[in-house]
Amino acid sequence: MKVKGIARRSIWLREDGWSLALIDQRHLPHEFRIATLTDCAQAATAIRDMWVRGAPLIGVTAAYGVCLAMRVDASDRALSDAIELLLATRPTAVNLRWALESMRSTLLALPVGERERAAYQRAAAIAEDDVSSCSRIGDHGLAIIESLADKKKGPLGILTHCNAGWLATVDWGTALAPIYKAHDAGIELMVYVDETRPRNQGASLTAWELQEHGVPFTVIVDNAGGHLMQHGKIDMCIVGSDRTTSRGDVCNKIGTYLKALAAHDNGIPFYVALPHSTIDWTLVDGIAEIPIEERSPREVSHMRGLDQEGQWQEIALMPEGSLALNIGFDVTPARLITGLITERGTCQASAEGLARLYDKGA
Amino acid sequence: MKVKGIARRSIWLREDGWSLALIDQRHLPHEFRIATLTDCAQAATAIRDMWVRGAPLIGVTAAYGVCLAMRVDASDRALSDAIELLLATRPTAVNLRWALESMRSTLLALPVGERERAAYQRAAAIAEDDVSSCSRIGDHGLAIIESLADKKKGPLGILTHCNAGWLATVDWGTALAPIYKAHDAGIELMVYVDETRPRNQGASLTAWELQEHGVPFTVIVDNAGGHLMQHGKIDMCIVGSDRTTSRGDVCNKIGTYLKALAAHDNGIPFYVALPHSTIDWTLVDGIAEIPIEERSPREVSHMRGLDQEGQWQEIALMPEGSLALNIGFDVTPARLITGLITERGTCQASAEGLARLYDKGA
């Protein structure tokens, strides 16, 4: 998608053909900075410290992290160490494991001397697969938006939580792909963007993406969505997923469950957009089985932003010495989800729905 | 309640017997500042700009605002002007109207020369009524907490939203009164405090109150409550009310509705604590009828706190030029509320429940 009119991806190879460039998302929306990664440890840091985030983008970054490791040492041991290091960075999104297992099985089958080149090929294929999945998610979601817009006078109100835009993937995004395609098709929209505390990915990343692309949006606090639904301002919700169980439970950014409850209470369709790499076929019950990341309390007790002189500042929000708890994700049970929008089409959030599209993971 | 060991109220008369002192809550939790009000216009500013907030405290402050006006001019016209000015400060909390109508009817019945003294008497009575109502709410709520604690091993998890503590009233608080009484009775608690964006009354005021009183608490972002309920961390919710309809719908800080939905979905009791002054007997359907305050978008787009040098800073959170919407309250339908805890006891959130306690407002 475009930034100041220039087509960008969230991650790409530099002209040297091996070092990795990515948008360092910690500085958005106030600064557009590009970081360069030259070794696997840096890739792990970039994922752990959230220079990049978003389930699909984490997977792609990890795949390239393996490439960087293979340049130095392509032995079985080095491969296994690299994968272990990268896997430990974030526990919830399953795309990370999926991408790393895909790298492992590809590379282990090859002689050591061929692994570096094959790693870059496989990582590039994972990235391209993500772009094309997201574009197709956009097409399938567009059909849903079109049919809702046909029945609506004035702009269609769409609520989204966190950032499941192109910054969470390589390009297009998951939840935002249908929104971009609908906007480009001339459908009048108003996107309500949940701020998404504690890290504010909505207010910083989603708002920035939509502004750069020219899609009308309004930022709201996470508390406001229920009220807007009660008063007819929201016609549909679309969010992303960090892990989807075989039965259609969806683990996504903390607070997603609350919006799904409100949508259900107000009869508003609630869709989840996700590529196949987000589905964990080994899991059934999302609430019981998905590991949920707990992050530093400092993300709750402090906040970063620009002061009046345009300098970054971190400010304290709570009385000194207060306990805070920072849970990264929650699970929305399938019963609250109207449909899953995947690259293969839209299905019910159920074992049957997913099996129809994927033939049980095939 | 106590601040650094000294018993305090949120508002009181100075030793001169007429000027008004109050805790300027805009500076909490980082600074404890007392402001003095000497005229009615200052009282209106203190309410509008949220030096004080919380439905009961707004009512008491407005009553004293009338006193300050009566000192200067106790004519019918001056009384009516003062009430009009004060009524226009905040639209949602009904206590404001209730307190002002109580002042009006008391003072209009008296000769002009007696009004100043009578105004101070009536305002003091409203304040004392609030203290005793809150204390009795604490007693009735304590009984509920005791019965839940009897069935629980380990600390009882109580979630609260916004600040309905002693800073929202004259003393004790509404939602926090039962918590203070339970803590003082030796019941082991863990209070989960919703941050409460956009103005963060939970992270700043509730956290500060609980810390000063020594009640164990954990601040969470507004997004986290649903997850904690799914995982058995919350045994009950208690919130306050800014306006309660005759049928038991409750208008409270934006986001309350989302927590009530989550409590309902997880079978967790959801209580609302409120004094009689919060009940609007003229209203039936809260969602359709209660006027909801919309405040400055800047409260969403910017945040204030202490920087690393201990200076107040306001920081920008969103891309420049983004739209934001700031809705102050939402309405939780009676069907989601387990019970209303009032100074007369606990009742069902229904016309019948309220009528049993209040004989239809008598």
Image (cartoon, coloured by chain):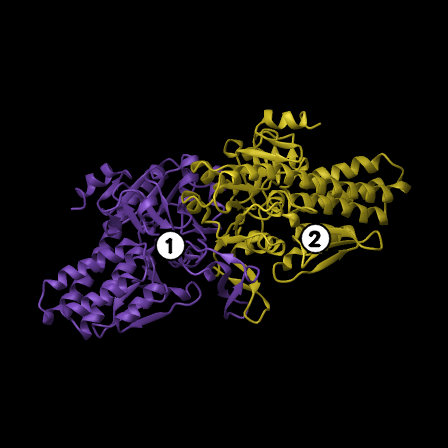
Chain colours: A yellow, B purple
Using the image as rendered, state which of residue B136 and residue B216 is in the foreground.
Answer: B136
Is B157 left or right of A199, judged from the image as shown? left
**A326 relative position to A274: left or right:** left
- Do tags 1 and 2 sit on the same chain? no
Residue lying furthest left: B111
Q: Amino acid at mark 2?
A: Ala
Residue A119 picture quarter = top right
Relative image position of residue B193 (x, y in whole percent): 43, 51
Q: Residues within 10 Å of mark 1 (few under 14, many from 20)?
A: many
**Nearer to the camera, B147 or B174:** B174
Residue A125 badge: none
Q: Position of residue A151 (x, y in %)?
A: 49, 38
What residue is at 56 percent from the left and 40 percent from the top? A145
Residue that label 1 marks? B163
Q: Is residue A226 above or below residue A200?
A: above
Q: Nearer the viewer, residue A212 or B231?
A: A212
Give left or right: position of A74 versus B261.
right
Q: Which residue is mark 2?
A: A46
User: Which of the 4 image quadrants contains residue B236?
Assistant: top left
What secondary structure is found at the residue carrying circle 1?
Answer: loop
The residue drawn where x is 34% and y is 51% is B176
- Percent x, y for residue B49? 37, 65
From this viewpoint, is residue A272 visible?
yes
Residue at screen point 22% across, 75% down? B16
